[in-house]
Image: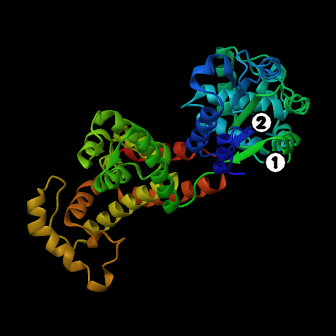
């Protein structure tokens, strides 16, 4: 079953007693939920016909009371359990832990819900880990409970999660797996017209509850979109739906400008599109100037900000630029590549100055003076056969000028050591559970705050 077939069936007035929508592509999943709800429950009936339950804290008794009671209005009634954890299992505890790490700073409430799910599945009781009890967990006990996570950094996130849950009062409850109660509820059946919709980011298809829902209802998967062309096409299709609903169009140049600024990443791109629709008001056509006025910096702008801040040893600006790049959906490894490239340019500039082949150069030299006296010599050092993209001498004169100006802030041995650091960071990103953002932040702080000796 796919979404189109499910919608076609709904248009005929036929809906399943249960739907499971799962996957990493949050926007598409949310849009599918909206479409399904629009088809089943009219907006005028939603006060008594639509109920939402937080999946991080499933209340089975509340769910039963909603699902087993007929609708007060006599029409369809839908109960939505969002972000349920009943499909998680011990086999994907390491995934839950990574989600805790990913959300602990930006979205602590979400991290706390993942943490409660982790407790349910791992067997660690709240009474045993609260206060300083978590410190008594041995490495052997951890490996036995969580096979795929070494737990080397648990001292960083475990006490924080305990404090977060304590502050929110999320410290009680039965930590047993509630999936059996869900199974019984589904097998018992609902009154005619009642429907259960579950959403989840990840599922273990081996669990009995998944098989029960797959047999009794409809399962729809919204996996992450792979590849740039597929991402662009998905964005185009979803954007056209939004534009159509609002009676708007984008000029070809506006499409291009929006894509450049957002990298065609689905959620950021569509969020910016919504802003543009509001910005133009009654106008039906969104133009390139509107995009320039409304949408934030391009990825290229953020890359330039980051590398410039690194070269100028401005840690605060570098960290802000890093956040902007991550918000735009740029992958950690791509950012690491940009940083490595900047360090290599600085290293090559340092080598040029140390070679003694350049006329005297100073960091406060004007660009015009550089173009007249220094650049011709630099250009002469590069033979036609050696003009490779990764060589500083083949770059634009202004790039060479800036690299020569900034390299004096970094002693040559320090730059060489930074390359070793970046290789180690790359290895850690690919082979460990350490937060990639933290690795890059630590490097930027180190590179921007080290004093020239």
What secondary structure is found at the residue carrying circle 2?
A: strand
| Residue 241 pos. (x, y %) | 47, 45
Residue 127 visible within the image: yes
Of the two numbered discs 2 and 1 in the rendering, the one whose residue sits closer to the viewer:
2
Image point (17%, 57%), residue name:
362
Residue carrying label 1: 205
Could you say which quadrant of the image residue 98 lies in? top right
Q: Position of residue 442 (x, y in %)?
A: 49, 43
Q: Position of residue 124 (x, y in %)?
A: 83, 29
Return the mark for residue 375: none
Q: Taking 417 as reference, is 88 above or below it?
A: above
**Residue 443 x %, y %:** 47, 47
Residue 443 visible in the picture: no
Q: Rate crowding at label 1 as few (under 14), some (14 to 19) or many (20 or more) other CA atoms within 10 Å.
A: few
Looking at the image, what colour scheme do you see?
rainbow
Foreground residue among 370 and 306 = 306
Marks 2/1: CA–CA distance: 16 Å
Give me the disc on residue 18. 2
**N-terminal-most mark, 2 or 1:** 2
> SS at mark 1?
loop
Query: Residue 204's image quarter?
Result: top right
């Amino acid at each position: 079953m796919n979404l189109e077939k499910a919608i076609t069936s709904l248009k005929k007035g036929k809906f399943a007693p249960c739907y499971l929508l799962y996957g990493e592509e949050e926007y598409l999943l949310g849009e599918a939920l909206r479409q399904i709800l629009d088809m089943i429950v009219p907006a005028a009936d939603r006060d008594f016909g639509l109920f939402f339950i937080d999946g991080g804290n499933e209340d089975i008794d509340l769910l039963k009371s909603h699902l087993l009671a007929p609708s007060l209005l006599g029409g369809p009634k839908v109960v939505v359990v969002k972000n349920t954890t009943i499909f998680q299992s011990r086999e994907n505890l390491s995934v839950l832990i990574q989600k805790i790490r990913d959300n602990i700073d930006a979205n602590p409430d979400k991290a706390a819900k993942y943490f409660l799910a982790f407790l349910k599945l791992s067997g660690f009781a709240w009474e045993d880990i609260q206060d300083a009890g978590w410190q008594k967990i041995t490495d052997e006990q951890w490996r036995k409970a969580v096979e795929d996570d070494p737990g080397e950094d648990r001292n960083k996130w475990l006490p924080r999660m305990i404090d977060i849950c304590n502050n929110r009062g999320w410290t009680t409850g039965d930590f047993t797996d509630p999936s059996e109660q869900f199974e019984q509820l589904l097998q018992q059946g609902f009154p005619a017209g009642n429907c259960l919709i579950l959403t989840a980011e990840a599922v273990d298809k081996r669990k009995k509850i998944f098989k029960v829902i797959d047999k009794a209802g409809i399962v729809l998967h919204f996996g992450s979109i792979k590849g740039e062309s597929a991402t662009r096409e998905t964005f185009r299709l979803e954007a056209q739906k939004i534009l159509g609903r609002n009676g708007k169009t984008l000029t070809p140049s506006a499409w291009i400008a929006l894509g450049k600024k957002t990298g065609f990443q689905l959620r950021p791109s569509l969020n910016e599109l919504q802003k543009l629709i509001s910005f133009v008001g009654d106008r039906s056509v969104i133009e390139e100037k509107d995009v320039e006025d409304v949408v934030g910096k391009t990825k290229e702008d953020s890359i330039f900000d980051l590398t410039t801040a690194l070269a100028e040893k401005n840690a605060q600006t570098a960290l802000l630029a890093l956040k902007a790049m991550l918000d735009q959906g740029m992958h950690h490894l791509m950012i690491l590549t940009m940083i490595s490239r900047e360090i290599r340019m600085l290293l090559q500039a340092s080598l040029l100055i140390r070679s003694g082949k350049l006329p005297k150069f100073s960091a406060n030299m004007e660009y015009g003076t550089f173009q007249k006296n220094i650049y011709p010599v630099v250009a002469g050092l590069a033979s036609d056969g050696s003009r490779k993209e990764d060589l500083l001498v083949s770059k634009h004169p202004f790039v060479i000028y800036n690299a020569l100006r900034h390299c004096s802030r970094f002693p040559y041995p320090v730059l060489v050591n930074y390359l070793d650091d970046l290789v180690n960071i790359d290895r850690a990103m690919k082979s460990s559970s350490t937060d990639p953002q933290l690795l890059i932040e630590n490097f930027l702080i180190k590179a921007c705050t080290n004093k020239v000796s």
